[in-house]
Image (cartoon, helix red, strand yellow):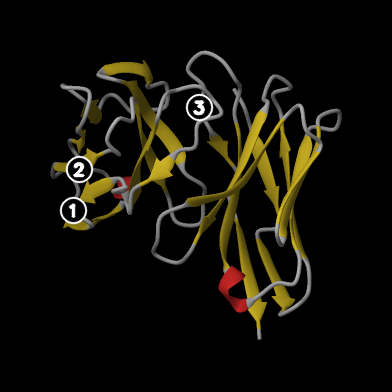
Amino acid sequence: EAGVAQSPRYKIIEKRQSVAFWCNPISGHATLYWYQQILGQGPKLLIQFQNNGVVDDSQLPKDRFSAERLKGVDSTLKIQPAKLEDSAVYLCASSLQTRSYNEQFFGPGTRLTVL
Amino acid sequence: GENVEQHPSTLSVQEGDSAVIKCTYSDSASNYFPWYKQELGKRPQLIIDIRSNVGEKKDQRIAVTLNKTAKHFSLHITETQPEDSAVYFCAASKAGGYSTLTFGKGTMLLVSP
C-alpha cells in the first residue's frame, strides 16, 4: 500500500515568514497526527485529527500554528509567523483509528530551517 | 501528562554483541508501548510493540520486556548487525478514548563491524 506522503521535503525561510506543509495519509486511515521533531529529540505531538475533527491540540502553539483537515483526508499545517525555534522536522502520521493499539505510520517529514 | 525517559542517549557496540535500551514512564494508566527505529534522514518505523497484559514479546533478534510495577520497559537486540545502526525511540500511550503517543528522546545505536 502507498505510504504517508508529505510535501515539501525541505523548506528554508526567514523568521517572521509563513510556511505551510501538506500531508496525505494512507487511504482509509481515519486518524492523522502532526508531530514536531527537534534535532536530537523524539517526536512531539502537535495535533491529532479523527476524520476532520480535532481531538487533541493541547501542545499546538495556537498563536502561530494552525492545522486543518477539511474533508477528513489531506491535512495542512501552517506556521505564521515562523520563529528560529520552529526549525525542526515536521512529521505527519496516520493510523486506522485512534485506539491505542493501532500502529502509526509516519511520512518522510518536512525539514524546516528558519534563518 | 505522560513523561517517558529513555537511556542511554548513545550506545556503541561491536557487531554480534547485544544492545539494551531502557525506558521509564510516569502514567500508570499507560498500557501500550511501541518501539520505533529511525534511520538517518528517514521516517520512524515500528519495529515491535507490547501491551500491558504481556511481560515479554520477541521477534527474531528483537525482544521487549515490560515491568508494570516499576513502570519501565526495555528493548533488547541480540547479535547486532551494522544495519541495526539507527536512532531508536520508545513510546507510551493509554488504551481507550483518543490516545496519544508520548515518545522518549531516543537512543542512537552504533554497531561497528
Q: Name the image quarter holding residue B69.
A: top right
A82, B42: nearer the viewer? B42
The answer to whether marks 2 and 1 mark residues whose Cβ atoms lie closer than 8 Å is yes
Label 3 crowd (10 A; few <14 / some 14-19 / many >=20): many
Give the vertical position of A57 relative to A89 (above or below): above
- Is B45 left, or right, of B76 in this rendering? left
Marks 1 and 3, how far apart in space?
25 Å
Q: Amino acid at mark 1?
A: Pro
Circle 2 is placed at which residue position? Answer: A21
Give the vertical position of A42 relative to A63 (above or below): below
Residue B3: x %, y % from top left: 63, 32
Q: Chain of mark 3?
A: B
Q: Amino acid at mark 2?
A: Phe
Circle 3 is placed at which residue position? Answer: B100
- In the rendered structure, find residue A8 and report the number of the disc placed on it: 1
B21, B55: nearer the viewer? B55
The answer to whether marks 2 and 3 mark residues whose Cβ atoms lie closer than 8 Å is no
Marks 2 and 3, how far apart in space?
21 Å
Label 2 crowd (10 A; few <14 / some 14-19 / many >=20): many
- In the rendered structure, find residue B73 and report the number of the disc placed on it: none
Looking at this view, name the residue that lies furthest to the bottom: B113
Q: Amino acid at mark 3?
A: Thr
Residue A52: x %, y % from top left: 25, 19
What secondary structure is found at the residue carrying circle 1? loop
- Is A99 left, or right, of A20 in this rendering? right
What secondary structure is found at the residue carrying circle 3? loop
Residue A90: x %, y % from top left: 33, 46
